[in-house]
Image: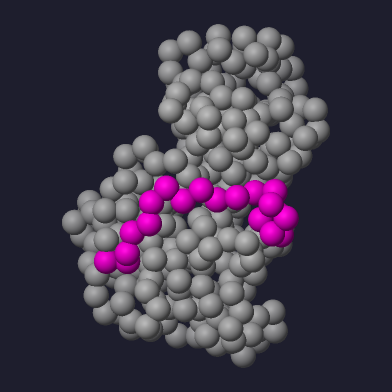
Amino acid sequence: MKAISYRRYGGPEVLEYGERPEPKLGPDQVLVRVRAAAVNPVDWKCREGYLDPILETVFPVITGWDMSGVVVKPGASVTEYAEGDEVIGYVREDFLSLGTFAEYVSAPVRTLAPKPRPLSFEEAAGLPLAGLTAYQCVVTVLGVKRGETLLVHAAAGGVGSLAVQIGVHLGARVIGTASERNHDYVRSLGGEPVSYGEGLAERVRGIAPEGVDAVFDTIGGETLKISANLLAPGGRLVSIADPEVVTYGGRYWFVRPDAEDLTKLSQWADQGVVSVHVEKVFPLEETAEAQKLSASHHARGKIVVTVPEK
């Protein structure tokens, strides 16, 4: 099968487009013909070796954890899916080896959910990792409730845009940091945009003088420190970018595969509660360019790679 892989850590130049063996099908796995795979920052971070301290790596590594596609064959123990079913998945193994930027992936059922019917394969591929990250942080960790104020950083990005939509659906007032060119986009999601950078604290206090009830940090560093000081009494803080969040009484979170959570997101997409904005689509052989764009931090929403049908 055609796939994108790398044999050593490094920059985009280590990515190779070529033939790799088709994956074996385990008893609790589903063989999926991949139609699209979304690029996430963790992809190039894995490629450059940043996750080596926590994840075993078996080279060559097929990159990617997100995908949408069609079931080719269910494993012997699988009753949830049948041939022809359209699915989405956050297909993260406990080590780096067999990813989703390939014609086929064997995905454990614990990583899958039905594909939302209104979404294209490209849009659906952008939902699993970003959506689960947003859902688990906003719903599970922060426990955002109706009437509360939620501050979301990088609100125009893949994770942030979904966090804004989820917060709004839960009945929260959502403030989202974004560049000025993305303010209208944040408003279209139901959020109140503020520009990031110098003076951020004053701008947030200007519209939430008593502070915010919850902060979803996707940036870390100085932004995290500012966020901690913006919390109202009893406020909650979670970060996916900076483990130092624990020093401020917050929680550091790394998204985990969860079929129940992903199914809820798929249902919300069916109902129009959440949508996925695709900024740019690349063919599989141009994955290196897609990862470069992701690393630039200038994309709105998601970057997606398509796998052509045979």
Residue at left 64%, top 85%? 82
What percent of the width, then of the height, locates residue 215? 62, 29
- Marker count (numbered): 0
The answer to whether residue 270 is magenta is: yes
Above-or-below relation of 303 to 250: below
Question: Which sits in the foreground, 232 or 163?
Answer: 163
Give the quadrant of residue 28.
bottom right
| Residue 208 on image: x %, y % | 67, 15
Question: What is the image's colouring?
Answer: one colour
Tell me which segment is drawn in magenta.
267-285
Q: Is residue 181 left or right of residue 238?
A: left
Q: What residue is shown at x 70% (from left), y 84% (from top)?
A: 79
Towards the viewer: 8 or 127: 127
Quarter of the image where one finds residue 271: bottom right
* Residue 11 visible, this angle: yes
Q: Is residue 205 magenta?
A: no
The vertical placement of 244 against 45, above or below, is: above
Give the quadrant of the N terminus. Answer: bottom left
| Outermost residue toward the left in this view | 13
- Where 257 falls versus 230 (above or below)? below
Whether 32 is drawn above or below 16: the answer is below
Q: Residue at x 38, y 57 (%)?
A: 281
Quarter of the figure with residue 80: bottom right
Q: How far from the left and from the top, in percent, is residue 266?
A: 66, 60
- Residue at 55 percent across and 81 percent down: it is 71
Q: Position of residue 258 (x, y in %)?
A: 64, 61
* Residue furthest bottom as drawn: 76
* Residue 52 makes an appearance in the image: no
Q: Quadrant of the C terminus?
A: bottom left
Of residue 257 and residue 176, the one placed in the foreground of this image is 176
Residue extending furthest right?
A: 146
